[in-house]
Image (tube, grey):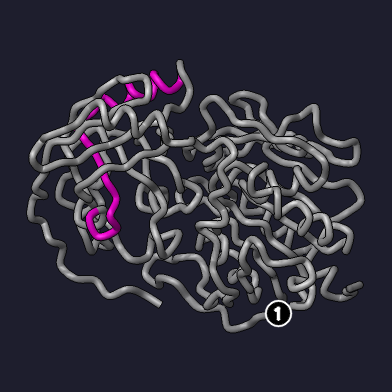
């Protein structure tokens, strides 16, 4: 399955004045792009050199404004294939340089047009590396982007909006981004050059994916392994999940505070753990699994966001370069004895992977499905599928 291409619109975007106001009253002046209006959220930074469309469309960025450290964002345009969700949950974007006309054979829209279409407020012309240094020193601040064609900004009001925004601590965003009804993934596999998305015609295994903010490329990987994937809401009961007779359960990535989501998610996962079925978690799913096993989580000062994060696999001493997007982490000292740490960050030593001893249950903090990012960790899908195949032969529930 491929997308038909049409000629790029290379008309130079018309920009307007914009400002970024932080809760500490710092003000950054720039040029507005995308949607006209205000956007308030937690300001984080992402160090990826490529994949801005996948990053912006990742539901895990709900409640956040993304500061891109790489200066050239928008130079390959946008298309209909590099989307990680149907709805964009990112609050806003910050770029260093003006968006140029796209130069890529897959491009269908200029990035500015795409941002307007998806009602994403943006600002460019900022020293994004200076802003990144500020975040590294002080932690991720709350802030507001205001994009106003008239250039009239009520600074006092914008500071007040930023200050009063509650922040991500204690915020359950999974309930907002999750699917409202159960559906079956349409079977598209991972993208191939010249072929686009092929369709999986053999559905030999059934995976139930609990949607905390799932990325499409995760579903594509399951299609590569000939799986039928049924996606359910994050509040779906364990009883309903078991009635669907899964061969394995996947806990997806997602935004917000895992402890807040855990208020309803922990009980569901605990019941599934008792059934001894294979369970695999990524990102928020990793944190929710840890909570269900008795651990605790905490907010990080900076978080990990980028496509060049080194992680050590403690089971074989290999180093993997990974794609990451998380602002919370597992508290190592809180892990029970029956849980083994399998991966750790070589940046700051935080837990990047765990497994439950004597059961086919494991998770990682990073994103092995990439999009964007390196492909060092795809073996985790194979590892999960091998356990799923074993379980399919001897279902106990």
Name the image quarter holding the N terminus.
bottom left
Q: Residue 25: x, y in percent?
A: 31, 20
Residue farthest to the bottom, as pictured: 201
Q: In which quarter of the image is the C terminus?
A: bottom right
The residue under the point 58% across, 33% down is 310
Q: Give the range drawn in magenta.
A: 116-136
In this rendering, position of residue 38 left or right of residue 179? left
Note whether 391 is above or below 288 in the view shown: below
At x 24%, y 60%, the residue is: 117
Percent from the top left, x then y, of residue 267?
Answer: 78, 55
Instruction: Describe the element under mark 1 as helix, strand or loop.
Output: loop
Give neighbour class at mark 1: few <14, some 14-19, many 20+ (Cα, 10 Å): few
Q: Which residue lies at the image location 37% right of the left edge and 25% below the top edge?
A: 23
Q: Mark 1 points at which residue?
A: 204
* Rendering quarter of residue 203: bottom right
On screen, residue 222 versus residue 64, left or right, reads right
């Amino acid at each position: 399955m491929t997308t038909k291409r049409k000629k790029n619109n290379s008309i130079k975007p018309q920009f307007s004045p914009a400002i970024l106001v932080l809760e500490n009253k710092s003000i950054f002046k720039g040029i507005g792009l995308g949607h006209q209006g205000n956007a308030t959220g937690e300001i984080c930074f992402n160090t990826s050199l490529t994949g801005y469309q996948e990053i912006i469309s990742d539901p895990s960025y709900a409640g956040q404004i993304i500061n891109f450290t790489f200066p050239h964002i928008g130079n390959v345009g946008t298309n209909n294939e590099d989307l990680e969700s149907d709805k964009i949950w990112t609050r806003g974007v910050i770029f260093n340089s003006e968006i140029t006309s796209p130069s890529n054979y897959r491009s269908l829209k200029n990035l500015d047009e795409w941002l307007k279409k998806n009602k994403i407020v943006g600002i460019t012309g900022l020293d994004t590396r200076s802003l990144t240094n500020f975040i590294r020193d002080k932690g991720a601040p709350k802030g507001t982007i205001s994009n106003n064609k008239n250039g009239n900004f009520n600074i006092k009001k914008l500071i007040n909006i930023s200050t009063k925004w509650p922040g991500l601590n204690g915020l359950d965003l999974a309930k907002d981004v999750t699917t409202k009804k159960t559906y079956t993934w349409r079977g598209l596999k991972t993208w191939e050059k010249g072929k686009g998305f092929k369709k999986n015609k053999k559905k030999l295994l059934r995976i139930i994916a609990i949607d905390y903010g799932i990325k499409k490329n995760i579903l594509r990987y399951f299609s590569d392994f000939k799986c039928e994937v049924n996606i359910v809401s994050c509040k779906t009961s364990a009883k309903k999940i078991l009635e669907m007779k899964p061969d394995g359960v996947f806990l997806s990535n997602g935004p917000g505070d895992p402890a807040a989501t855990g208020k309803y998610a922990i009980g569901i996962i605990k019941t599934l753990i008792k059934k001894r079925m294979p369970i695999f978690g990524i990102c928020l799913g990793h944190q929710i699994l840890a909570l269900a096993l008795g651990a605790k989580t905490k907010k990080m000062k900076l978080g990990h966001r980028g496509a060049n994060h080194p992680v050590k696999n403690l089971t074989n001493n290999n180093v993997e370069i990974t794609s990451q997007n998380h602002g919370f982490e597992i508290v190592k000292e809180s892990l029970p004895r029956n849980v083994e740490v399998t991966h750790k960050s070589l940046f700051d030593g935080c837990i990047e992977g765990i497994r439950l001893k004597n059961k086919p249950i494991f998770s990682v903090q990073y994103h092995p499905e990439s999009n964007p990012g390196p492909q060092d960790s795809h073996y985790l899908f194979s590892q999960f599928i091998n356990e799923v195949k074993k379980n399919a032969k001897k279902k106990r529930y």
